Amino acid sequence: MASKVWYAGNRSYSPATSYVADMLEVFEAAELDKLIKPNDVVAIKLHCGEWNNTAYLRPVYARTLADKIKSLGGRPFVTDTTTLNYNPYPARVTELDMRFTAERNGYTSEALGCPFIVADGWMGTDDVHIDLPEGYILKEAFIAKAVAHADVLITLTHFKGHPMGVIGGALKNLGIGAQSKRGKYNVHLGGHPAYGMGATTEFHPERCKGKNECPTWKLCRDCCPYGLFNVKDDTIEWKREKCVGCLAHLGATVGCGVMDIPREPLEGLHAAIADACMATVKAVGKDKVGFINMGIDVSPYCDCVMYADMPLVPHIGIFASKDPVAIDMACVDKVTESEGTPGSAAEDHDVAGSGAKKFENAAALIHGLSEQAQINTGAIIGLGSKEYELIKVKPSATKYYGFTEDTRPGGARFKKLFSKEDPFPRDRFNGQGFKREEKIDFEKIR
């Protein structure tokens, strides 16, 4: 049976059609507000953005949701989780680093109007174990404790591409982003005998120039927190049997060609993301989880890299649903039908036309990886439906989307104040206020 996905347009031309207003409109149209009861503790799960990333969601969206949740009697908090060492210079591996990065990106309690909480704690080990017999590959998951213990979970997702996951949508926001650190090892198949990085990575030590010739050899030596690389004078050694898939080597040994990542661990990751998303939904309760996808700044890579390329396509709109499979499918379809952004990676890879699969070719670390594998797995395990009914939400003609601290018109607000101190200098130049030319030649400046 088709799931319902509510959708607001990709254009803004009035306060009632701002993306903030659109988000609230689809939130209510999808009846996500009805998930929340007075005194419910509500987690707003998002990605706070990596150091120097600029495509992540602006904090105003989370703030607006937090204000809405408070108006419903709920107790909101905004949350994200610590990461694996997925590059040589990670910025969110511990709670300390996460807080520095999140606050630099604007995610402070003052900006949000509610606490920002690192859901899996200081080292990423605060979690709840969930049995998952229905999983496609994962049979257990480790959910960040603050998410698992919430009464309601609102998944606020920046929809975009991802080098390993191919797409970064609602499924990934929970399937990776709501997992503790040990949960992330699990989803990335660390230690898996058939699909783990240690088991499958193609290792080419003969390509390493070693200490004698490589100016950046120390990066390969120092990237792994488990010390599994030993750079010698003319080669490199790797204790692959001990690799747990923390991904710290991606910007080092992979970048210089010493390692080639095959398809299998990435395709296994796609299935595991859907499994872990289901585990998160199970932890909170299926009738207590809602999803919002913000289809803006659709960058080819995730918010977890330290930069953001231009969007693959123009904004595709704002989406809301209670089905993570359907909402991601709707967003993928919107991107597919959209024309690519001129000069973007979609154009670089000749997939800028309407109907072309943008993510598989312009976002995936290995070109051609399926952009629907997460979605297909979610449908197979019963997490949601790929069939959806897309319902357009019309802008409200009556709701107020202006400044909320004082909703009176400007005249009523400032008449008394301006009578005390008029900011216009009427006592100058016969009431004209300022020294200016009376007539100018407009043709001259046109």
Image: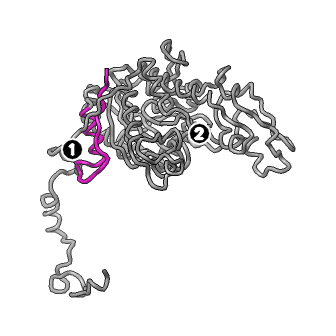
Q: Position of residue 132 (x, y in %)?
A: 49, 15
Q: Residue 202, located in which quarter of the rendered image? A: top right
Task: Residue at 77%, 36% (x, y): give it.
Answer: 204
Kindly identify which numbered label has been placed on residue 395. Answer: 1
Q: Is residue 26 magenta?
A: yes
Q: What residue type is disc 2 on? A: Leu
Is disc 2 placed on a helix, strand or loop? loop
Please tell me which residue lies in front, 179 or 247: 247
Q: Position of residue 168 (x, y in %)?
A: 47, 36
User: Is disc 1 surrounded by few (<14), some (14 to 19) or many (20+) residues within 10 Å?
Assistant: some
Stretch in magenta:
1-29
> Which residue reaches farthest top?
133
Please tell me which residue lies in front, 82 or 229: 229
Q: In which quadrant will I find the N terminus?
A: top left
From this view, report whether residue 186 is shown above or below residue 334: above
Is disc 1 placed on a helix, strand or loop? loop
Please tell me which residue lies in front, 50 or 314: 314
User: Is disc 2 surrounded by few (<14), some (14 to 19) or many (20+) residues within 10 Å?
Assistant: some
Q: Name the residue beneath numbered marker 2.
A: 365
Q: What residue type is disc 1 on? A: Pro
Q: Position of residue 277 (x, y in %)?
A: 46, 25
Q: Position of residue 48 (x, y in %)?
A: 46, 42
Task: Residue at 42%, 34% (x, y): give it.
Answer: 45
Judge from the rendering whether residue 94 lies leftward or rightward of residue 259; answer left or right.
Answer: left
Task: Residue at 41%, 22% (x, y): give it.
Answer: 281
From this view, report whether residue 241 is shown above or below residue 256: above
Counting residues from the N terminus, which is met first, the one under dot 1 or under dot 2? 2
- 1 or 2: mark nearer the eye: 2
Task: Residue at 46%, 48% (x, y): give it.
Answer: 352
Q: CA distance from mark 1 to mark 2?
A: 39 Å
Q: How is the image coloured?
A: one colour
